[in-house]
Structures are given as C-alpha cells and as structure tokens.
Amino acid sequence: MKRFEGLVLCSDVDGTLIDEHNSVPKENLEAIQYFRANGGKFTLATGRIPEAVTPVLHGITLDFPCICHNGCSIYDFYTNRYIDTVELPKEAHKAAEQVMELSPDSGIEVITPEGIFVVKQTFATDRHIAFEEITARRADSLEEVPAPWLKILFAQEPDQTDRLNGQMRSSAYHANYTIIKTHQYYYEIYHKNASKGNALETLCARFNIDLKNVAAIGDNENDLSMLLKAGISAAAGNAPGSVKTKAGIVTCTNSQGAVADFISKL
C-alpha cells in the first residue's frame, strides 16, 4: 500500500498554497506531485472564481472538482461546469446597501456564475482584479447585476475592513447571511449555508469520500469550517491565532512552503 493511499488533501489557495507574489513555491509543487505519486488525491478550496484558479494550476493536477467562491460553488475543471452552487437570496441587495451606507468608500464587487461585476470601482477593487489575474465587467448599480448572485465582496483598507466586520456582525443581517472577513482587504457576504466546510461535505458525499480521510489546510477564518470537518487539519504559519488554535497542525508560512510542510507531517 502506498504511503498516502486513501487520503485526500484539500488546500486553500491565497495565504496557503501560493506566496505573496501569487506563485506556488517550488516546494509545494514538488510535494504535491510526490503526494499524488504515492497514492494521495489533491484538490483546492478557495474564495477565488474558477477563472482566477486557472493560473494557479500550472504544474498541479486536481483529482476532484474545486471548491470555489468560499464554498458557494464546486467547479469541475475537466468538464468546465459547476456541479453545485449556493446562491444568495434576492434580498441580499439590502445587506449590500447597508454596507454602502456604513462604508461609502468601499469598493464593491458582485460575484455570479458568469463572473465578477464591479459595481463601485476603487483602488482596492483594481488591486483585487489585478492580483487574481481576472477580467471583470462594470455595472452602474446593484440592479444591473444579473441573477443569480453567489457572493458580494467589499474591498477596502484593513482598518476599514475590521470596523465594518464588527458593525455588520451586530446587524440583523448576520442571522441570514455568512458575513466574514476573508482577507485583510476583503469582506464578503454570502448565503448562510455556504462555507468551505459544507462544500467539502458535499464534495465528499458525491465521491464517496470519508471526511476522516481528508487533510485540509488553510490560513484564515473562512477556512475554519473546512478545518473543523476534515479528519486532519493544519493552519499555515502566517494564519492568525484564532485559526491556529483550531487546527491540529501548524506549518511554516505560505511563503516557506506550507503545503509541503503539511504533507511531510502526514
């Protein structure tokens, strides 16, 4: 029996698999190839849209569909189609409007299965689009964005993100939506049942994978639901303490090859 036979590794992308230059460290590429050659299966769970995952896949083979949009969708790169989506209800525009009132300087993106629509362009949204190497369409208002919506992303400076996170978590909308800081610059709203953890559970049920045979690694709050459901969990060394304390293993940082370090500990 091969060393990793029966084990599925599911990795976050930003802050975990890739470094600060949007590249996959050589250590990770080599370790993933070694992991798969020795019986393991590999896939990703990310907040990115499928288009933004594609540049990351150079040198990487996915054995299962990819969890995208922070669990709002599961996308199969072999058939180029979604196999599952969790859509925002139509009332979500009201939550977006409240954010616009609380933080008028925030950039706003609405993410749909068709792609990203920039409703309010700022330096922060430009940075997001450029970093993920994706194209985006413009919409002059929320009403112009076609349904269905998967999530709403607000881009701003870190101090504004923390303030907004606190304000929205204490609002009435928190009971109906997942409201979460996904990056120091980004704050997102999506369906209350959408999470990386729930998407991982859906993926495992579809492919008859036992969750106890899943090893998951991430670096942020949006990864916690996945880490808590996986049989083996790890936090990258650059993760905040709130994530590290919930993970079974703490690796080196993403720039040092966190995924490779995790594989070496399996």
Image (tube, rainbow, N blue to C red):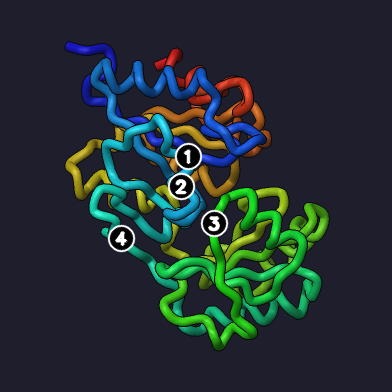
- Tell me the kind of residue under disc 3: Ile
Residue drawn at 43 percent across, 18 percent down: 30
Q: Name the residue under label 2.
A: 53
Give the residue displayed 35% in from the left and 64% down from the top: 85
> Residue 137 location, x and y as percent?
56, 72
Camera-near label (3 vs 2) is 3
Lower position in the chain sequence, tag 4 or tag 2 = 2
Above or below residue 51? Residue 234 is: above
Kind of residue at disc 4: Tyr
Task: Name the amino acid, label 1.
Answer: Val
What percent of the width, then of the height, locates residue 107?
71, 68
Disc 3, disc 4: CB below 8 Å? no
Quadrant, the C terminus: top left
Instruction: Decide if residue 17 is on the left or right side of residue 7.
Output: right
| Label whose residue precedes the other's in the sequence (3 or 2) | 2
Question: Looking at the image, do the residues carrying marks 2 and 1 touch, with CB atoms under 8 Å apart?
Answer: yes
Per the image, label 1 sits on a secondary structure element best described as: helix
Residue 166 falls in image quadrant: bottom right
Disc nearer the start of the sequence (3/4): 4
Q: Residue 82 carries which label?
A: 4
Real-space Cα distance between discs 4 and 1?
A: 19 Å
Q: Circle 3 is placed at which residue position?
A: 134
User: Cβ–Cβ below 8 Å for labels 4 and 1?
Assistant: no
Q: Nearer the viewer, mark 4 or mark 1?
A: 1
Q: Residue 56 carries which label?
A: 1
Label 3, label 1: how far apart the Cα atoms are: 12 Å
Pointer 3 or 1: first along the chain: 1
Which residue is at a point 79% across and 75% down the rendered structure image?
Answer: 104
Q: Distance between the residues labelled 2 and 1?
A: 5 Å
Residue 175 pos. (x, y %): 54, 70
Task: Give the quarter of the image for residue 20.
Answer: top right
